[in-house]
Amino acid sequence: MEPNSTEASEPAQPRARRGRRGGGRAAKREQRAASGQARAPYITRKVDPLCLIDEEGLALIEQNAETVLEEIGIDFRDDAEALQMWRDAGADVDGERVRFPKGLCRKLIMDNAPAEFTQHARNPANSVQIGGNHLVTVPAYGPPFVRDLDGGRRYATIEDFQNFVKLAYMSPHMHHSGGTVCEPVDLPVNKRHFDMVYAHMRYSDKAFMGSVTAPERAQDSVDMAKILFGEDFIDPETGQEKTVIINLINANSPMTFDDTMLGAAKVYARNNQACVVSPFILAGAMSPVTVTGTATQILAEAMAGMAFVQLVRPGAPVVFGTFASSVSMQSGAPTFGTPEPTMVMSVCAALARRLNVPFRSGGGLCGSKVPDAQAAYEAANTMSMAALVGVNFMLHTAGWLEGGLAMGYEKFVLDADQAGMLPTLLGGVDVSDNGQAMSALREVGPGKHFLGCQHTQENFETAFYRSEIADNNSFEQWESEGSLDAAQRADVRCKSMLAAYEAPAIDPAIDEALLAFIQTRKAEFPDANY
């Protein structure tokens, strides 16, 4: 799973998130921001994606990936059913190694997988369209630690998990509630998935991700979704299950799928829920050190996984995913915000378009331990390039610190603010009559200013993106309001958002049914299993 930590210590209790005095207009700005604002449920791109490779290069990588699939193969470990499905499909199965006739995986995907699909939220206004020209922003996934200015770095708890769900719900720039926004280590491993999935269902009404850490936990996620959606779980026009959950199926790179991921994929596919099939790559350690070699391996692994989902249920939604970073050849540590992973991301986005499936990658990735300049540079590089190359499902958009080991409260707010700029960037240049602004040019003429002209008066409220965090005031005003840096301003906003949070309405009967299901299922497990 991405990411993962094997460190162990007693989890610290979360500190109370007390407000910090900002004063003056800054405080009022934070209060307005905390109340949220109307936004589209996802971004629709109006510009062509950036591609850093030509047609000849893409064809070469596709040819090499087919060679990997046919001659080297992919291991499907500890899953006899999966191996038998591949035998029945015409693949060569030798032990746990599966070798695929050239073109088999591509045909299974292109003949069956949808080019785009809707993930339905319990509030239909928050349903998202995944694929095509659309971009969905999603919080970071998987950190076992959290960090804030008050308490520093500590193990995450279920209270932290709930807080990040609330922040994502309140942020107009987060389209999705996400999945394991942090790992609540204060709960038993075998039971915590109930509380995590319930938090997404109760504290938000945006789309969410399900559990994948065991097939049984995937089934619990589906069963809870059936309770949440009730009769609306089935599409009356098709008679099929609506896609209301998306989940992350990681390849165990290099070139391996394990029984945990395969089991979860089968559960979700059989229920028509979406699978993001995503090789987890640290280039140089888990793939070759070159962009072309890494992209070749990613394509082979992703095609094998997506094709398997189509064997389980033809037409089940899949997303071509990749998490690709590099490692330092000096220390072995992962690095972020560097050119090579961006090149891999661009290549894989183009390969996904040629397969006619949605693409997942990107986010506010960084290796910094705190929300400092390194975090800002690396996150901005990754996020903006992900948007430009054509990512459809941007997991890890907000909150990521320390190579994914920590979820930052202030970093979440800073990243969400940056994500708010993406609709403008991807909306393209306005060449309408208003965009041409000829009336303003005629009215003002040479040697004057545009501040008071009619066109400016008509457009000033929406003319430019206005950051909710950045301070562009005079030095004197900034000093009078507390001399706060970006992380401190984000801290103010984070606390004001949580203070202003109100849970979305839910049918009390549905909530009671969810809690009863959870209580019944938890009773089937031992009291603790750490």
Image: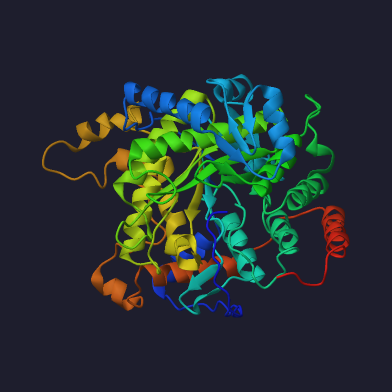
Furthest residue toward front: 94
**Residue 506 position within the rendered picture, expressed as x and y whole percent measured from the top left:** 77, 54
**Residue 196 position within the rendered picture, expressed as x and y whole percent measured from the top left:** 69, 60
- Figure quadrant of residue 373: bottom left
* 335 vs 478, nearest the viewer: 335
241 lies above or below 224: above
- Figure quadrant of residue 103: top right
x 58%, y 59%: residue: 181
**Residue 440 position within the rendered picture, expressed as x and y whole percent measured from the top left:** 25, 35
x 66%, y 62%: residue: 502
**Residue 123 position within the rendered picture, expressed as x and y whole percent measured from the top left:** 70, 45
Quadrant in which the C terminus is drawn: bottom right
x 57%, y 40%: residue: 277
Quadrant in which the N terminus is drawn: bottom right
* 176 vs 83, nearest the viewer: 83
* 518 vs 43, nearest the viewer: 518
